[in-house]
Amino acid sequence: MHPETWNQSEFMSFLLTYGSKVDGKIAPEEINLIIEYFGKDTYQTILAVLEKQSDFENVQTIINLKEKLFPGASGKEYILKLLQELFVIDNHFHIIERAVLNALNRLI
């Protein structure tokens, strides 16, 4: 599956899966949230893409597809809202998660 062919659900699954990995571990609550929103098959497919690409490629994917799939300020707001929901689902908002949220806020 190539990122340029992704729909909104696939992109958001990618973004949330990327976000779930930033603190070094994916909490079961984070996986469950992603699967609840986007489905198990999508999660597994996207996880494989995410793990195959370098971190630089993953960030480039986010930057390149954000405006195409979630244009403007409302798209950015939606993305950041879901990321924030993901980051607090395990009852911890780690410093690295805050840093990633701030970085993505600037990048997208």
Image: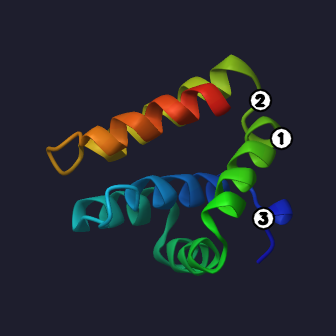
Q: Which residue is mark 1?
A: 68
Residue 17 location, x and y as percent?
47, 61
Q: How many marks do you count on the picture?
A: 3
Q: Quadrant of residue 50?
A: bottom right
Q: Which quarter of the image is occupied by the C terminus?
A: top right
Would you say residue 80 is visible in this rendering?
A: yes
**Residue 86 or residue 41, whichever sits in front:** 86
**Residue located at (64% from left, 80% from top):** 52
**What element does badge 2 sit on?**
loop
Q: Which residue is mark 3?
A: 3
- Label 3 to label 1: alpha-carbon separation: 12 Å
Circles 3 and 1 in contact, beta carbons < 8 Å = no
- Label 1 to label 2: alpha-carbon separation: 6 Å
Residue 9 location, x and y as percent?
63, 55
**Residue 96 or residue 108, whichever sits in front:** 96
Amino acid, disc 1: Lys
Few, some or many residues within 10 Å of mark 1 (<14, 14–19, 20+): few
**What element does badge 3 sit on?**
helix
Disc number at residue 92? none
Circles 1 and 2 in contact, beta carbons < 8 Å = yes
Q: Which residue is mark 2?
A: 71
State left or right for residue 107 relative to residue 39: right
Amino acid, disc 2: Pro
**Residue located at (67% from left, 73% from top):** 53
State left or right for residue 80 relative to residue 96: right
Q: Residue furthest left?
A: 91
Residue 70 location, x and y as percent?
72, 35
